[in-house]
Image (tube, rainbow, N blue to C red):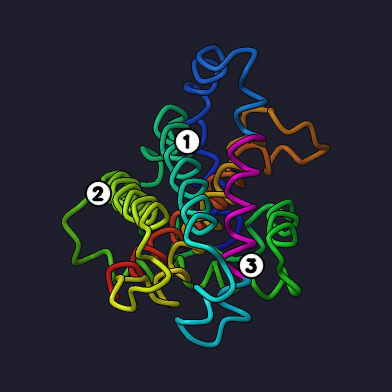
């Protein structure tokens, strides 16, 4: 597909799967809708900033636990899990999962950074990106790369993201138990997560932030002067990038 054909195709997906669902989504959330979006977007960005710090400045696993308490790491897991849970709900109720899963290959194979709303760069800046333009291009490339990987997977995208919530919840409970243990400081055999594992959680938080922000644009919750493309099929492009980022994070969690 050329750019015009891709835009027409994505516009069709928006009109077919998403626009009819948006009024119901707005009604379900009603007065608290704006607060919920901002609350969970803030949670995702806050967690992504902390986890980006770990990836950037902690050179090995031990430095993570020398820098942050177990309790603080547990709160970051909680922020990530709850924002992902909210993200999954609005993607489902808003029809985004239906649009993505019905044409995943077509959406990703032609996706480029030019298709993603520029507002996503603001999200990347909020979580500490020093070069949001290049980072957005890298995220889109990584999302596109998932076409080959997912061709051999049996689970649907929504099931993978749902399972990710359960995986994070299990880890969160483990960290909470560790934070309450009196033997934590002295016991060197206490199991601790690796730097790569935290990088994966950071990708999940980052992907959730991108996705939540653009669903908010599509529903009109974020009152910004954006183009009609940004409020429609551009949101699908951004959600596709967010989903790819989350799934890449899940891969890091599995690889530990």
Specify whether 143 is left or right of 26. left
- Residue matched to label 2: 156
Whole-percent x, y for residue 56 in the image:
62, 79
Q: Please report the residue visible at 60 percent of the width from the left and 28 percent of the height from the top.
A: 36
Distance Cα–Cα, label 3 vs label 2: 25 Å
Q: Earlier in the sequence, mark 2 or mark 1?
A: 1
Q: Please report the residue visible at 44 percent of the width from the left and 54 percent of the height from the top.
A: 243
Predominant SS of the magenta segment: helix
Task: Give the residues in magenta.
Answer: 38-52
Given residues 107 and 2, the one toward you in this image is 107
Q: Please report the residue visible at 52 percent of the width from the left and 54 percent of the height from the top.
A: 76
Dividing the picture into quadrants, the one containing residue 88 is top left
Instruction: Check disc 3: other Cα within 10 Å, few if <14, some if 14-19, many if 20+.
Output: many
Q: Are marks 3 and 2 in contact (CB under 8 Å)?
A: no
Q: Earlier in the sequence, mark 3 or mark 2?
A: 3
Dividing the picture into quadrants, the one containing residue 184 is bottom left
- Residue matched to label 3: 136
Specify whether 24 is left or right of 34. left
Whole-percent x, y for residue 148 in the image:
30, 71
Whole-percent x, y for residue 143 in the image:
46, 65
Distance Cα–Cα, label 2 vs label 1: 18 Å
Would residue 50 be counted in the magenta stretch? yes
Given residues 69 and 146, the one toward you in this image is 69
Would residue 48 be counted in the magenta stretch? yes
- Residue matched to label 1: 86
């Amino acid at each position: 597909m050329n750019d015009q054909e891709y835009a027409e195709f994505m516009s069709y997906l928006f009109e077919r799967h998403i626009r009819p669902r948006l009024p119901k989504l707005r009604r379900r959330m009603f007065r608290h809708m704006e607060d919920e979006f901002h609350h969970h977007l803030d949670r995702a960005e806050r967690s992504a900033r902390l986890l980006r710090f770990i990836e950037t400045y902690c050179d090995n696993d031990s430095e993570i636990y020398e820098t942050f308490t177990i309790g603080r790491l547990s709160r970051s897991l909680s922020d990530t899990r709850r924002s992902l849970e909210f993200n999954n709900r609005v993607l489902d109720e808003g029809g985004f999962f239906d649009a993505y899963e019905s044409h995943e290959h077509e959406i990703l194979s032609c996706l480029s950074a030019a298709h993603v709303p520029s507002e996503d760069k603001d999200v990347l800046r909020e979580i500490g990106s020093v070069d949001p333009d290049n980072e957005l291009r890298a995220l889109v490339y990584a999302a596109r790369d998932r076409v080959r990987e997912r061709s051999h997977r049996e689970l649907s995208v929504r099931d993978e993201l749902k399972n990710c919530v359960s995986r994070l919840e299990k880890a969160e409970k483990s960290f909470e138990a560790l934070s309450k243990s009196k033997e934590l400081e002295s016991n060197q055999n206490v199991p601790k997560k690796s730097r790569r594992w935290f990088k994966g959680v950071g990708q999940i938080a980052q992907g959730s932030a991108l996705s939540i922000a653009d669903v908010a644009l599509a529903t009109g919750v974020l009152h910004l002067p954006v183009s009609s493309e940004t409020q429609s099929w551009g949101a699908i492009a951004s959600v596709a990038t967010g989903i790819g980022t989350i799934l890449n994070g899940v891969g890091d969690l599995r690889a530990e």
